[in-house]
Amino acid sequence: MLKELNDVIDYIEDNLTGDLSLEIISKYAGVSDYHFRKIFFYLSGMTLSEYIKNRKLSEANKDLLHGEKVTDVALKYGYQSLDGFTRAFKKWSGFLPSEAIKKGISKSFPKLSFVITVKGGISMEFRIVDKPAFNLVGVSKRVPMQFEGVNNEIVKLAESITDEQREEMHSLQNIEPYEIVNASYDADFNFLKEEGYLTHLIGVLTTENQVSEKLEKVPVEAYTWAVFPNEGPFPSTLQNTMAKIYSEWLPSSGYEVINAPHFSFTKMDKHKKDYAYSEIWIPVRKKS
């Protein structure tokens, strides 16, 4: 994965003034657009779109200092109007393009390079669980596909849960993990594009089949699950675990991800601020 990430960085550099399709970029990493954006964000601390914008504006700053006209530079880096470029440049650098030319002011954002750092031989904790078929039961909603940031529709879904729904979920809960989980499935483009919708469910796992009309029931077949427990500052520990799953564990594990609901849960520590225990459950199978 390290080589693929650096190949992506090189591809971006070669196409800063061209069409940087995010779908094409993800192909260089050999994973879906969805998973690549997650890996990139967790490892770099910024979204892929932010990185591309920063690199474009950094190179635009150089071009301005080399005497190129503001209008030409704006068009060169894909801005449809001079005003749009000026606003973006000012927000990024703190000064106007014209000031950069007149005063020779510059701000740079260097090209990223991913390297491996080994610290004390720390291993990644996980367990493999063979789980019989069960039902996900809870409240669900079709929400817009969103790779980064807070999905406000999921927040609204959580806020919509009634006391009656919550009581029924707890009464049905009878299979590990005995927690309220967040599950995602049925993405319009199989999580490959930041387009369309997916179904998000907040609920519990159960082997019971009798469910009232207040709740949604989603059957899940018997699968093998890779479970990744993590504990520490929230959400950074959870994010770092997700990054390691796809960038380190999965490529060398001998497993591949199954196209089925995956879920996670988080338990906030009552005595430590912004500290939590979480588990990420991913359906997998041995590679053939």
Image (cartoon, rainbow, N blue to C red):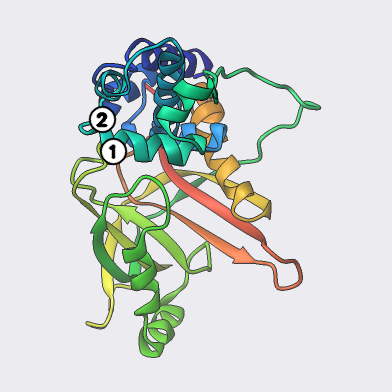
Q: Is residue 163 above or below residue 221?
A: below
Query: Closer to the camera, 15 or 185?
Result: 15
Total marks placed: 2
Q: Is residue 209 above or below residue 89?
A: below
Residue drawn at (63%, 67%), measured in percent from left and top? 268
Q: Are marks 2 and 1 in contact (CB under 8 Å)?
A: yes
Q: Is residue 239 above or below residue 198?
A: above
Residue drawn at (41%, 29%), measured in percent from left and top? 97
Locate residue 122: give its quadrant.
top right
Residue drawn at (63%, 48%), measured in percent from left and top? 237
| Residue 127 position in % (x across, y down) | 59, 43
Q: Secondary structure at mark 1?
A: helix
Residue 62 is left or right of residue 218, and the answer is: right
Query: Closer to the camera, 48 or 229?
Result: 48
Name the residue carrying label 2. 79
Going from N to C along the chain, the mark reached first, 2 or 1, is 2
Query: Closer to the camera, 274 or 200?
Result: 274
The answer to whether residue 286 of the structure is visible from this angle is no
